[in-house]
Amino acid sequence: MEGLKESEANLVVYLHPSMAKCVNDAILRELSSLLFMYSETFDGVVLAYDPNVRSNLAKILPGIHPYLGVRLKAKLLLFSPKPNMLLEGEVVKISRQSIHAVILGFSSAVIADEDIRDEFKYKVKHGKEVFGSRHHKKHKIKVGTIIRFLVKSFDEEILHISGSLVAVHTGCARWLDTNLEEWSQADSTTRKRKDRDEKEQKIADDKMMANREMPFLKKDDRIKKLKKKRKEHT
């Protein structure tokens, strides 16, 4: 899954003097406060960390309470979804208007009906809501399905993702993995059709521009002819 990355960070953790005898525990406690929170510094949500204290020495900061500044290097696992990245999540709710999923157990995602391609048809089967493919009977999305979708946007404050199932390489992750060749061909066909349509549109636009220019050219020719006749008479 995209959106996950590792990062090495040089950090300084400030500890109260009362923590001098249990520095390691205090460092872990401070780092734990970063978990599942979006950090602008690291450009992502901190999911895990592996600290390595660089020195046994700590810098004492002057003040009423002389805090200890401990330098360390930490490996961080970050969740940083960007537009058009492929993510996977478990479907927790389905309605006619949307599909709701949870990613990595903490981030919510919603895919609105306008972002679900026409291939998927909403229906209620045996009392359960399902989005089923019109072309492939076994390609279904229901509660509990792991879906693969594209990111449209990410709200860093509430860790909420807006997703899309418009692309042919999105949908039920299990079906996509077991039918790779089939949807790859469909994706290739869609791209070729899009390229052909774009070329045809460009040709049509060029013709339209040429037709617009013709009257002006004809007008210029008439003016030149009139000027030529006047010269001949004079």
Image (cartoon, helix red, strand yellow):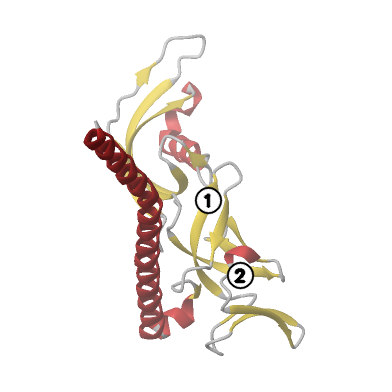
Is any part of residue 178 visible from this angle?
yes
Q: CA distance from mark 1 to mark 2?
A: 18 Å
Residue 69 in percent (x, y) is at 39, 23
Dot 2 amino acid type: Val
* Mark 1 neighbour density, 10 Å: few (under 14) some (14–19) many (20 or more): some
Q: Which residue is mark 1?
A: 153
Residue 163 in percent (x, y) is at 55, 60
Q: Nearer the viewer, residue 123 or 201?
A: 201
Q: Relative to residue 169, is residue 11 depicted above or below? A: above
Q: Relative to residue 69, is residue 11 depicted above or below? A: below
Check contact, mark 1 vs mark 2: CB within 8 A.
no
Q: Which residue is mark 2?
A: 91
The residue sitting at 51% across, 55% down in the picture is: 152
Residue 20 in percent (x, y) is at 43, 27
Picture quarter containing residue 198? bottom left
Picture quarter containing residue 21? top left
- Figure label count: 2
Between disc 1 and disc 2, the foreground one is 1
The residue sitting at 38% across, 53% down in the picture is: 209
Q: Nearer the viewer, residue 60 or 12?
A: 12
Dot 1 amino acid type: Ser
Q: Relative to residue 43, is residue 125 depicted above or below? A: below
Is any part of residue 100 visible from this angle?
no
* Mark 2 neighbour density, 10 Å: few (under 14) some (14–19) many (20 or more): many
The numbered mark, 1 or 2, whose residue comes first in the sequence reads 2
The residue sitting at 56% across, 54% down in the picture is: 161
Q: Secondary structure at mark 1?
A: strand
Q: Secondary structure at mark 2?
A: strand
Q: Which mark is residue 106?
A: none
Q: Furthest residue to the right?
A: 127
Quadrant holding the C terminus = top left
Quadrant holding the N terminus = bottom left
